[in-house]
Image (cartoon, grey):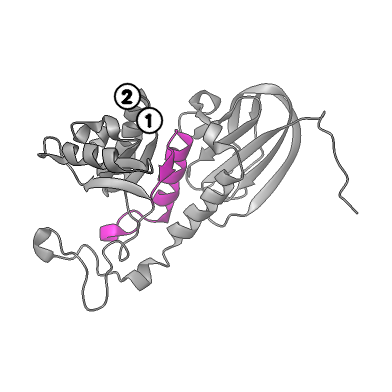
Amino acid sequence: MIWILGGETEKKQGAWHELAEYVDAIDPFGRLLTNHSSHLRGALEGHAVFDFDMDATGHDSWKTVSQVLAKLRKSADDSPLKPFVSGESCYELHMQQNPDYLQRYQFWALMLAGAAGHTYGAAGIWHMGTPEEHGNWGGWDHQPYDLTTWNEGMHFPGSAQLGRGKALLESLPWQQFAEHPEWVGKDAFAAGIPGRVRVIYQPIRGVYQWGGIAMKGIQPGSWSAFYFDPVSGRRYDLGVHKLSGEWKSPNVPSPQDWVLVMERVNRSDKISSPAK
């Protein structure tokens, strides 16, 4: 249970902050409290009671992706430091925009840049579109955002792809990750724990681009590595390499976006035989 006080809230909107402070004061369980706004915690007065920033940037394709990444970094600079969750950005095929590749890009870019969470949304579902009613009961004079139904939207590919990405991160100590752009070139995203684990997202580079991913600042030692296909979830083992400083991974399996996972191999770890 999380209290989300206000949707699309703007600055100086009356007594919203009084409501936030009231809920915080009477909640006997200390539940998390936040606000759904493009202005982050600064949307309301009295925002000290908010436990994390929940962003609502919009759905304007790559422009929105750039904006939400900038807001993540702004949130990280605010004091006191609080977790950042992408609450609404670029729902899949909303108004025929934001296909599955963009879904993967914004998920991996945000999570490797320090986000504490990301919200996936899809046309048809969030407004519960049906063949009889498109579901936009808000503004725009009841004009439809999409004629997609929720039955169609639930099968969009981006949801499964982000689910596979979530499962991979949950298999790693991702809560301890920090962003490390110095590990890679300007067109990739990297995060991890120095000397222990690295996760790199390499966006699509165009046709005929099979080249591996160049890494920098690798602590000396043996590292296991694999490519993770963010579309299918398939893993391609790259073996164990003795590395130090710089390394370029082998060619990627196909010219698409890829996730490279590297883990330090501790040769001193004891290996226990399975119980008979």
Kind of residue at disc 2? Asp
Q: Position of residue 14 (x, y in %)?
A: 9, 39
Q: Nearer the viewer, residue 18 or 143?
A: 18
Residue at the location (51% across, 28% down)?
Answer: 178
Q: Are marks 2 and 1 in contact (CB under 8 Å)?
A: yes
Using the rendered image of the protein, determine whether residue 81 is visible from the camera's viewpoint: yes
Question: Label 2's element?
Answer: loop
Q: Position of residue 206 (x, y in %)?
A: 47, 45
Kind of residue at disc 1? Lys
In the image, residue 141 above or below residue 193: below
Q: Position of residue 235 (x, y in %)?
A: 65, 51
Position of residue 177 in the picture relative to residue 5 (left or right)? right
| Between marks 2 and 1 in the image, the one whose residue lies nearer the viewer | 1
Q: Quadrant of residue 51?
A: top left
Using the rendered image of the protein, determine whether residue 88 is visible from the camera's viewpoint: no
For the magenta stretch, what is the residue range? 92-119
Q: Which mark is residue 78?
A: 2
Question: Label 1's element?
Answer: loop
Residue at the location (61% across, 45% down)?
Answer: 171
Q: Position of residue 70 (x, y in %)?
A: 32, 32
Q: Which mark is residue 130?
A: none
In the image, residue 185 above or below residue 25: above
Q: Which mark is residue 82?
A: 1
Q: Quadrant of residue 96?
A: bottom left
Q: Residues within 10 Å of mark 1 (few under 14, many from 20)?
A: some
In the image, residue 117 above or below residue 192: below
Q: Nearer the viewer, residue 236 or 87?
A: 87
Q: CA distance from mark 2 to mark 1?
A: 8 Å
Q: Nearer the viewer, residue 199 or 21?
A: 21
Q: Locate the C terminus by quadrant.
A: bottom right
Residue at the location (37% across, 26% down)?
Answer: 81
